[in-house]
Image (cartoon, grey):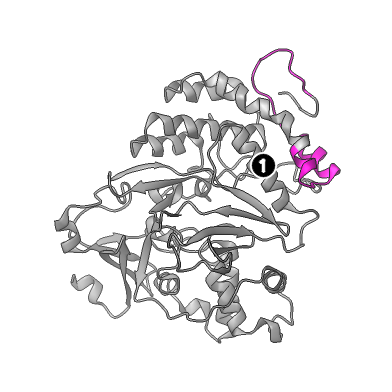
Amino acid sequence: MSNLLDKKNIELINVFVFGEKIGVLGSDKNKGDSYFLFDKEFLNKGIYKNLFPFVLKRTDQVQVFKNQNNKTFKGLPSVFADSLPDDFGNAIFNKWLSYNNIKASDLTPVHQLAYLSNRGMGAIEYFPGKNLDYSEGINLQKITRILKNVIKNKKNVFEDSLNSNALLNIFKLGTSAGGARPKIIVSENKVTNKLIPGDVEFSENYYHYLVKLNIGEDTYNRERVEYGYSKLVKMAGIDMMPCDLTEGHFITQRFDRVGGKKRHILTATGISGLDYRNAEHSSYENLFEIANYINLPQNDIERLFRRMVFNYVFHNIDDHLKNHSFIYDEKKDCWGLSPAYDINYSLDALNKWVGAVHSLSLNGKRKGIELEDFLGLAKKYAIKKPLKIIEDVESVVFEWERIAYEIGVEDKVIDKISEDFKIYSEKKNRNRRNINKR
């Protein structure tokens, strides 16, 4: 091993993918820098050459990562920072640490990866991991009650029901999935229908779900709205994993657990190193450049275009680079576009932020988008029949009221969301009820 990684201030962890040790990741507690060294045996096998197409070089030399110590990457290379929990997972993790008298400030990102170990989304695993044995059956009512206390940061947060074991169970369930809203991962036995924590189990004996929890803290049930949007997404010809609504919670099957195997997934931020919080990095042009660089097939490029159009038509402004992902095919050593996810009306419909704009810009704009902006990008990336794609997506607008009513969305919420739908095409004789045409 390199002398650089032998220093006492460097915390180390082994990195595995598909059961193969691919290298060692290090984090400097003092400088905030990180280091990665590929395993020589792995390099000599010549496998998975496109595992990390942007960020890591296939070399037997130590790679040093500086200037990564921000909220998104926390000092790590982006491909590994992608494994870390986002806002919600961090809130749960920090609360559990506090309960156990552990200072979050004393832990390096490598420590946090050790807690995730083999429980994270995707196929990257970190060893040696921290032993987190405690788990119990899944009780959504109990979980939502505990989470409500955690998120509101109540003074009595350490009441009897919120003991270390309860927090540990929530931590295991909720720290793997990204995003700011409360969510957990669970697995359902195909025969008994019993729900168990979804942190380790990935066999074909189970369905594997991500559950977005409605904890009653919003002015309306936003998970119900997301379920309605999932129906619109599929009607618009966009592929998404099966979704459902249970006890007011939004449930979707995971696309990183298929056929009894873990699938290697990276977000657009993780695969490229572009910070989704940085406005200069956040554009659809950059997203398409990433897709082009990793040689996505043209069909995937056109699928991505259709999703972009949907986000603008249906005002899904939370379209940042971590809400677009790619799936690695280990047999073909190539990348493809993941199913769509996290597509929703992301504002509070009853308390709108007037100045809210899209996370990703198009043609240098985050508002005032016109048909020509779509067509310009379509021309650059050889999208076939872009106008037809736009009109196909727009035609679904008129299904919103019916779908939302059928699944129990309140009338006032339906109307407020409809106000923000946009029609961009010039097709005539279209019913524009509840549409503000630009």
**Which quarter of the image is occupied by the C terminus?**
top right
Q: Amino acid at mark 1?
A: Tyr
* Residue farthest front in this picture: 191
| 62 relative to 430 in the view: left or right | left
The residue labelled by disc 1 is: 229
| 408 relative to 181 in the view: left or right | right
Q: Is residue 422 magenta?
A: yes
* Residue drawn at x 35%, y 60% as measured from the top left: 66
* Residue drawn at x 43%, y 47% as measured from the top left: 274
Question: What is the x, y in percent for residue 267?
Answer: 45, 50
| 314 relative to 41 in the view: left or right | right
- Start and end of the magenta stretch? 403-432
Question: What is the x, y in percent for residue 271?
Answer: 39, 49
Of the pair 257 and 437, the residue shown nearer to us:
257
Question: What is the x, y in percent for residue 398?
Answer: 74, 29
**Which quarter of the image is occupied by the N terminus?**
bottom left
Quarter of the rendering containing residue 151: bottom right
